[in-house]
Amino acid sequence: SASLLIGDTGGATVTYRALSSFGDSSYASSTSLKVDTTPPATTAHLTGVLGANSWFVGPVTVSLSPADATSGVASTTLDGSGYTGPRGYSSQGTTAITYYSTDNAGNTESTQSAAFKIDSQPPTTTDSLSGTLGANGWYIGPVQVTLSASDATSGLASTTLDGALYSGPRDYSAEGTTAISYYSTDNAGNAESAQTADFKIDSIAPSSSASLGGTLGANGWYVSPVVITLN
């Protein structure tokens, strides 16, 4: 008896014959065989609009590329279902995918995995005004502006108030109407549309003067009716 080790091959024909101890040989015989002991390999490709810090800021398309050099790819599975073409994902936050392929010899690739992050929603910012409020919506002293920002997915990166980075409450004291603008940006790079607010300050009390008209007599006494005019 004899043995022959044959590695991966798409197809091979083995020819053999028997030899006796006297040197006689049988007629040659042959057999065909196919060997594939190597599973396929699959790679994942992610496409989408990439923002900051490896976050996608919109849907992500997953495309799989399987390859098998010997018997060929029979099927590919993505997230538990048969893969027939690129697949879109839009869930906010981190998404993990799993995939693998099987070849025509029945070899199954070890499960592969990948993950990606999506945040397509900008943060939101609200303002709060504090100060001494007088009549008709007017403040009668300085106004303090406090901003509160939040982002549910990638988190808050920065907030801007009137063109400058916001780091805490800011005081305003200019007389008259003041308009402010503000917005926030998240860690994915999404920027909120600029928000606006306005308030009115009048901290200066009015002033008036009086002038007296009439005939002045002695010792500060008027000797005629007095007309008082206020200015």
Image (cartoon, rainbow, N blue to C red):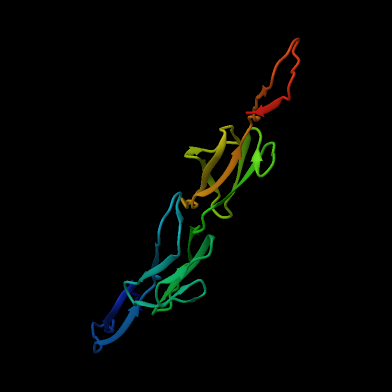
Name the quarter where the N terminus is drawn: bottom left
> Would residue 68 be visible to someone looking at this image?
yes
Q: Position of residue 66 (x, y in %)?
A: 37, 70
Query: Residue drawn at (51%, 47%), measured in percent from left and top?
Result: 183
Q: Is residue 68 left or right of residue 140?
A: left
Between 173 and 2, the one lying in front of the other is 173
Please identify the residue farthest to the top as the structure is shown.
219
Query: Residue drawn at (43%, 78%), measured in percent from left and top?
Result: 106
Q: Position of residue 141 (x, y in %)?
A: 65, 32
Q: Is residue 166 left or right of residue 28?
A: right
Q: Position of residue 59 (x, y in %)?
A: 45, 64
Establish if 6 lies above or below 118: below
> Would residue 159 be visible to someone looking at this image?
no
Between 137 and 110, the one lying in front of the other is 137
Query: Residue drawn at (56%, 37%), measured in percent from left and top?
Result: 176
Between 198 and 205, the one lying in front of the other is 205
Please identify the residue farthest to the bottom as the structure is shown.
27
Establish if 209 lies above or below 183: above
Name the quarter where the C terminus is drawn: top right
Number of labels in the image equals 0
Q: Position of residue 13 (x, y in %)?
A: 27, 82
